Image (spheres, rainbow, N blue to C red):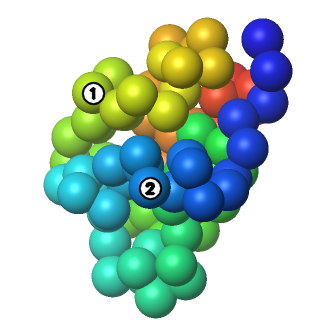
Amino acid sequence: MSKIPKNEETMLKCICSSCSSYTKCMEEGTLGVFCSVGDARDCLKDVVNCDCSECSVPSSYGFSSSFHCRDGSADQQ
């Protein structure tokens, strides 16, 4: 398994911003591709729902983990 990069390709495929757990704080920090960097924990108040399983980014790198906004990047889990 390889680390998921945070680059233009993964940012375009990323669905983090459409998740119901995505917050204004995350938006202001231009955060996304949480499965790559796990940089959302400081902004997370409550996990409303998890859409990670619907995203093609982690699965295309061989990861099946979820709740990246809460639990960190795919390789941290």
Which kind of residue does numbered mark 1 sit on? Glu
Q: Residue furthest bottom?
A: 28
The quadrant the C terminus occupies is: top right
Q: What residue is rendered at 49% in x and 33% in y?
A: 57
Comes first in the chain, label 1 or label 2: 2
Q: Residue furthest right?
A: 2
Q: Is residue 58 above or below residue 36?
A: above
30 with respect to 75 (left or right): left
Q: What residue is rendered at 42% in x and 49% in y?
A: 14
What residue does disc 1 label?
54
- Image coordinates of residue 26 in percent, x first then y, are 45, 74
Q: Is residue 46 visible?
A: no
Q: Is residue 37 visible?
A: yes
Q: What residue is rendered at 67% in x and 56% in y?
A: 7
What residue does disc 2 label?
12
Residue 23, image quadrant: bottom left
Measure the alpha-carbon separation of dots 1 and 2: 15 Å
Which kind of residue does numbered mark 2 sit on? Leu
Residue 31's label in the rendered image is none
- Image coordinates of residue 37 in percent, x first then y, are 70, 50
- Image coordinates of residue 50 in percent, x first then y, are 28, 36
Q: Is residue 73 above or below residue 60?
A: below
Q: Is residue 62 above or below residue 2?
A: above
Mark 1 near mark 2, Cβ–Cβ under 8 Å?
Answer: no
The quadrant the N terminus occupies is: top right
Q: Residues within 10 Å of mark 1 (few under 14, many from 20)?
A: few
- Image coordinates of residue 62 in percent, x first then y, are 61, 11
Residue 5, image quadrant: top right
Q: Is residue 76 above or below residue 65?
A: below
**Dot 2: what SS?**
helix
**Dot 1: what SS?**
helix
